[in-house]
Image (spheres, coloured by chain):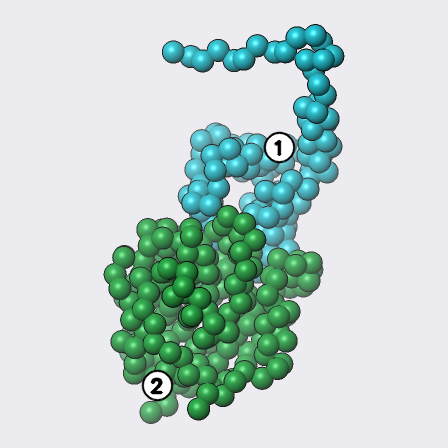
Amino acid sequence: MDALYAQRCFNCHGANGHGDGPLAVSLAVLPPDFRDTVQRKSNPQIKRLISDGNGVMPAFAPALSQSELNDMLQMVRFLSREGRDISWWENFDTLVAAHCSIPWEAVLGYDEPAEEKKP
Amino acid sequence: MRVRLGWQVWAVVLLMNSPSSALAATLAPQSFTQRRAVKLAIDDFTLTDQSGNTFQFNQLSGKVVLVGFAYTTCPDVCPLLTAALRQVQSNLTAAERKGVQLLTVTTDPEIDAPKVLAGYAKRYGAELDNWRFLTGDEKKLRAVWKNFGVGVKRKGRGLVDHTPLTAIVDRRGFLRVAYIGPTPGVRLVLDDLRWLLAER
C-alpha cells in the first residue's frame, strides 16, 4: 500500500477511498467517497483540502513537503476513478519502480535530454 | 502524597500506546476507551497557547480542567478525541463553563506552533473563552506528558505515537479521572465534570 496514503488517509478514507476506513464509523460525518467528490474538484481544490484540512480532517501542509502533497493528490485522483483500488496502485507503483530501475542509458545508448526550463 | 496509577491503567496505556496498530484498526474505537478514577497531583507548568500567550497551569486553580493530548496532523485517534472535547464544550451550561477549562496539549511541538494550533482550534469550532491549545519547547512538554502519564514516541515528521489520554483535573490540581482511548463518551465526561464541579 502506498505509504503516505496508508499513514495519513487510510484510517478514515479506507483502502479504496470509499470513506469506509476503520475510524470512519466513529466520525460525526462520514468521509466522502472519492468517486463522488474528487471527480468534481480541480487539482488545486483537492490540494488545498489536503494542505489546509477540513473539519476533523487534519491540515497536512505543516508536516509534509510539496512533493508529498502532490503524491497524495495523485493517489486521491487515482482512487477516485471507478473500479480503482489500492491494489491497482500497488501494481502501478511496481511498474513505475521497475521502469525507473532499468538503466535506460545503457539499454538505449543515450539518456533523455534534461527538460528545458521555461524562461 | 501521590497515589500512583495502578498496573491495570499502565497495561491499558501500553496497549493503547500504538493507536495505529492492527488492533486499533480492527476494533471499533469506543470499545476500548477505558475510564479510570485516580488521584495524582499535577505539578505546575508553563506553556504557550494558540495566540502565543504564556499559559500557567496554576492560574486555573479553583477550576475543573479537562485536558486532552493530541497533535494537529494526527490521522488517527486525535480527531475523534478533539471532536469529543468540542461536544463536551458545547453541552456545558453557561454557569458550568465558568468553572470548567478545556486544554489541548500537543504531543508534536515540532509541527504545532501557536499559529498551527490556532488553525486547528478554528477547524473544530472551539470557543476559546474556556479552551486553550498549548505548545512549548519539547523539554517543558516532556515534563507535562510524564506527569500525566502520557507516552510519546515520534515515528516521523508529523507522525507521533502517543497515549490517547483525556483527563480531568479537579479544583485542587489532582488528576481524578483518566479516559484512555480515542472517544471518551461525551455524556460520561459531562457527568464526571459535574461531579467534580459539585465538590468543594
Quadrant, the C terminus of chain B: bottom left
In this view of the protein, can residue B185 be seen by the observer? no
Q: Secondary structure at mark 1?
A: helix
Residue B121, horizontal then vertical, whole percent: 37, 57
Q: Is residue B178 above or below residue A39?
A: below
Residue B172 is labelled as 2
Q: Which chain is cyan?
A: A
The three-letter amino acid code for the residue at tag 1 is Phe
The tally of labels here is: 2
User: Residue under mark 2: which chain is it in?
Assistant: B
Q: Is residue B17 above or below residue A14?
A: below
Q: Nearer the viewer, residue B61 or B83?
A: B61
The three-letter amino acid code for the residue at tag 2 is Arg
Q: Secondary structure at mark 2?
A: loop
Label 2 and label 1: CA atoms lie apart by 54 Å
Q: Give the colour in which the image draws chain B.
A: green
Q: Nearer the viewer, mark 2 or mark 1?
A: 2
Q: Nearer the viewer, residue B136 or B186?
A: B136
> Is there one chain holding both mark 2 and mark 1?
no
The residue at 61%/62% (across/down) is B18
Mark 1: few/some/many CA within 10 Å (<14, 14-19, 20+): many
Q: Pointer 1: what residue?
A: A78
Q: In the figure, is residue A1 to the left or right of B174?
A: right
Residue B197, horizontal then vertical, whole percent: 36, 84
Q: Nearer the viewer, residue B114 or A101?
A: A101
Mark 2: few/some/many CA within 10 Å (<14, 14-19, 20+): some
Residue B112, horizontal then vertical, whole percent: 40, 53
Residue B100, horizontal then vertical, whole percent: 34, 76
The residue at 56%/53% (across/down) is B155
In this view of the protein, can residue A110 be seen by the observer? yes
